[in-house]
Structures are given as structure tokens and as C-alpha cells.
Amino acid sequence: MTGEPGGHDCHRDHGPYAGVADFLARIAADRPRLASRHTVELNAIAPRLDHAARPAAEEEPIRFHPARRTACLAYGATEFVAAWARTLRHPVTVRFDHVGSADETTGELLDALTRSLGTSPRRPGLLSLDLRDGGPDPTAAADPTPQSLRTALGESLAGGFYHHAARTARRGRAMVTPAGDLRHWWAFTTGLATALAALDEATEALELYHEARAATDDPKITMSAAYATAMLYARHLPVADRDPAQARDWLERALHLAAGLDDRQQRVVSTVFYEQGLALLDNQAGVSDRALRLIDDGLARLAAVLGPGERPQDLARLRHNRAQVHLALGEPARALADLDTVIAHDPGNCEYYVDRAALHRAAGRSRAAIKDYGTAIRLGPHLPEAYYNRAVLQQERGRPERARDDLDRVLAIDPGHLDARIALVNLHLRRGAFDAAEAGARAGLALAPQEPALLCTLGLVRSERGSPADADELFTRALAGDPELVEAWTNRAAVRFECGDVAAAVADLDRAVMLSAAPVPRYNRGTALMRLGRWDEAAGDFANALDQPGLDRALRRDLRAELARCRHAMAR
């Protein structure tokens, strides 16, 4: 900060979040109450702040964070810094050195901070960042050993910092060979493959497992490689390259090798774990009853070999799998019971709250769903999908301001989230904020130029602003991308009706009515048919619309009035 002899060293050799972690830790020490509202992201970015954390080497993770989590951490850290900046009384400049050589996590967070400072309407200029590619020579790191690199690799994988994990693993693989140090070589190889799969480079990960099988016939390594290969074929390879049959074959090889393990507990645990892959494939193939039997049997076998409180996350994962199978079998009550048990045993996993919220939402328990989404956001932290789903519920509950706040957060974390962009633009449109709606639609179209829903919404804005030709062209482009987009047929019909082309409007509304039983297309078509003097057909549309459930009072009143007009005209 201003007046300090040097800046924060961001060089990637110092690991994920180098430089920014020091900066955040200093603020946290100075503002502990503020830091307490951002515990999850601060502990992830600056682990020394988490006094209860155990070294990664002591953990046995059965799941890994998605790569997009770092964007969520950056958003939370930016909120923390912005809140701190609002307490400043004098301008402060924070210097960061070696930004051009920073790890991807550091760069992502600095980018988020720069955007935030550039758009903050509050007390502009009090906090500024001095970002330098150069700076004093980076502090020399201690010469790494295979063990120190392996520890660093484990920490990066556990944190979801996959670019740094991949670099560390490649560095480790360059130091050892399978003939000279098989244990470390395999750790670096499988660690690199895990990082690559998370970064959507699963094809290279597959090649690494083929290399491992060529390098050794060690049964534990070939067993692990077989399972990992199966998961690549089942979930991670590009969609065109996924192959359930190959995945099943590799799982069977892993199970064969697991059956030969000497230690009974490890044999059972590994076997049950690999069988969950078979259950996944069965559930995907629609054989959910067989998947359920595998999971139930696995839970029973684990209970027989595990002591009280042992491997709770493994048990929670199996019950979570069972909840998904119950859902596939059309048994949401059983799925909910499993998720309640899962959360009781593993309350720190955000994924479980998201799944339970979806069940609450489907059952109409919106308050319970909103509460679970809130917990997922806190633990995640800042999961875009949880914010988005909560926004939808807030909108359904008549709370548009809260919905807009959540949608703004989604887009701050993930500017490419098109569903959130579309929902936010439509909220702006409903409240008559046409400038905001048009700006939002154009921002979305800059990322996805042919997105039908955004073209449709922009068409509505242009129509409201008295540009029917622009609107018609935008609706037509939307329909070229999605011929089943009812809103585009309905709105293009409205534009053509207002321009006097009533026959074209009716033709568009014919398509809308074919695609949807909603009352508005029929109401609009009835109105157009009345203009053409086709009173009997118009009356049929109004009567049909009146039969639809859930009509709001104003629409019901208008439909009755128009139906009466038709009947009066036909009686003359």
C-alpha cells in the first residue's frame, strides 16, 4: 500500500493467488468483522487465515472443485475489497509486481478488482491498483524436491487451482522417471491428468493414462488408471468421444484388480467406489432399478467394514447418488429423505443444498428452496447457478428487486451466463427500463450474436421505441435460430398487426397457437380475427383462452368482454 517499500509479489513461482493473498490477509487482519462475512473465499485464497484447516496431504478428497470456482472466489474477494474500500478516508494505492508472470488465479482476481474499481459509484478514486509486469527480482524459491512438488500439487488440486496444478505436475514429471521413482512419477502423472480433465483437456489426460499402463503393471496404479479412464469416457471427453461401453469395460477392469487387494477394508471400499461408476452408467442408460441395487448393496458393504464416523464423505456421496437414482425413478420423497441424511452427515458440501433446493422448488416449497440456495451460495461460495435459481424464485414470489440483485451477481461472476442475461433483460423490460434492457440485450448478443431469446427481447425494445421494421427483422432472426420460440411468433405478429398486415399477424399467431396452449397467443389471434370480421373463429379463440387455468383477473375480464363483442356481432 502507499508508503510501503515494495509491492505484493505476484510471480507464479509463489503459487496460486501469490501477492493478492497477502493483500487480502492484511485487510482481514485489519477488519476481522468484515472478513467474517467472507470466510469461505478468504480461507480458500489465503489458507493461512483458516486455523482449522488440515494439510491437503491429510485429506482424501472424493470430489474436486469445478474449474469455474476460481471465478466465484474472485467475485467474493472483490466484494470484500470493495466493502473495505468504502471505509477508507484517504486515497490508497496498492502495488502488485510481476503481474505479467502471475498464476491464472491471481490474474483473474486482479481483473475482477480492476473491473470493480472502474465501475464502483461509491467514493471513486480512494482505492487504486498499481499493476506492474516488472518489479524487484522475485524472491528465489527453495530448490524443489519431488516430495515438496507433490505436496504443492495436492494442495492445488484440493483447492481447484488447476493451471498451477498442471504446471507443478509437469515440473515433477520432468524430475523423475517410472523406473527410478514410480511412486512420485505416478502421483505427478495422475495429478496432471486430473488437472487437465478439469480444464477440458481430457484427451491429453487419456493419453497420460495410456502412458502409465505402458510404463508399469503395478496393480494399484493400473487399477486407478482403469477407473480414471472409465470416468474420462463417461463424463469428461468431448461429447463426440464419450463411450459408455468403453467406460463400462474399464470399470470392469478396475473392479477385477480391486478384488485382488490384500487389505479387506480397502478392497471393499475400492470395489464399492468403482461400482458407483457402473451405477452412473446404468442410471444414464435408463436402468435405474439396477443402479439402485448397486448403491444399496454398496452402502450395506461399507457399513460392514467401516467403524462409527469413519469415511463420512464416502457414505454421503453414495446416498447422494441414491437420491439422484430415486429422482430418476420418480420418487422425489425418497430422494429428499436421502438428501436430508446426506446434509446431516456432510453439511459443508454446497452441491447437496443445490440438489435439495431443486426438490423443494419442484414441490412448491419456495421458502425452503430459497434458504437452501442461500446456504449453497455461502458455502460454494457465490455459485452462479444458485444465484440464478434463487432469482427465478424471487421473481415468482413478486420480488423483482431481489431477483435483479441476484441476476446482477450471476453476470458479475459469469458474464457469459445467457439465461441470467435473458432473465435480467426481461425484468428491465417489464419495468419499462428500455435503456437498461437494450444495453443488456446488446451485451449478451456481443457474446452470442444469434441467441434467439436475446434477439426476441431486443425486438421488443425496438418495437416499444417505435421502430417496427427493426423489431420485425430481429424477430425474424430469432425465429431462424429457434422456429419454436413462441414469444417471437407472438411478438412479430403484434408488430405486423400494428403495421396493418393483419393476415400476416394471423399466420404468425397460427404458429404460436400450434406450439403453445397459453392464453395470450389465442387472445391476440382472436383480436386479429375480429379485425378481419371472422367473428366465429375469434369467439372460439376467446372461449378457449378462458378455459385455461391460472388466468389473471385483468386478462379474464378482457377475454370475456371480447367474447361478448363477438357474440353480439354474430347475432346481428
Image: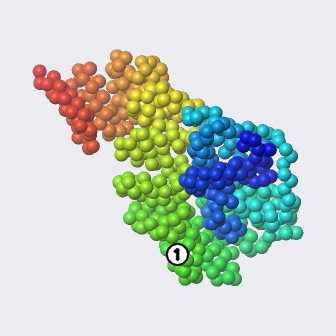
Residue 62 picture location, percent across and down: 62, 66
Q: Which residue is mark 1?
A: 299
Question: Going 64% across and 41% down the picture, which residue do you hit?
Answer: 112
Q: Compare residues 201 and 84 and report the one nearer the observer.
A: 84
Depth check: give the residue in front, 312 or 55: 55
- Where residue 499 appears, as percent x and y from the top left, is 37, 17
Measuring 48% from the left and 29% from the top, which residue is drawn there?
436
- x, y percent for residue 29: 65, 54
Residue 212 in view here: no
Judged from the image, the secondary structure of the residue bearing numbered disc 1 is helix
Name the residue rendered at 85%, 69% in the picture: 181
Compared to 16, does 183 lie above or below?
below
Q: Left or right of 26: which side holds 185? A: right
- Farthest-out residue, left: 572
- Image quadrant where one finds the C terminus: top left
Would you call the spot at circle 1 few (<14 residues within 10 Å), some (14-19), or many (20 or more)?
some
Q: How is the image coloured?
A: rainbow
Can you say which quadrant of the picture contains the N terminus?
top right
Q: Amino acid at mark 1?
A: Leu
In the rendered image, residue 417, in percent from the top left (x then y), is placed at: 55, 41
Nearer to the camera, 560 or 35: 35
Give the quadrant of residue 281. Answer: bottom right
Residue drawn 51% across and 78% down? 300
Q: Is residue 366 visible?
A: yes
Classify residue 123 by image quadrant. top right
Residue farthest to the front? 89
Q: Quadrant of residue 398?
A: top left
Judge from the rendering whether residue 285 lies leftward or rightward of residue 330; answer left or right: right
Is 424 on the left-hand or right-hand side of 558? right
Using the image as rendered, state which of residue 279 and residue 176 is in the foreground. Answer: 176
Total tally of numbered discs in the picture: 1
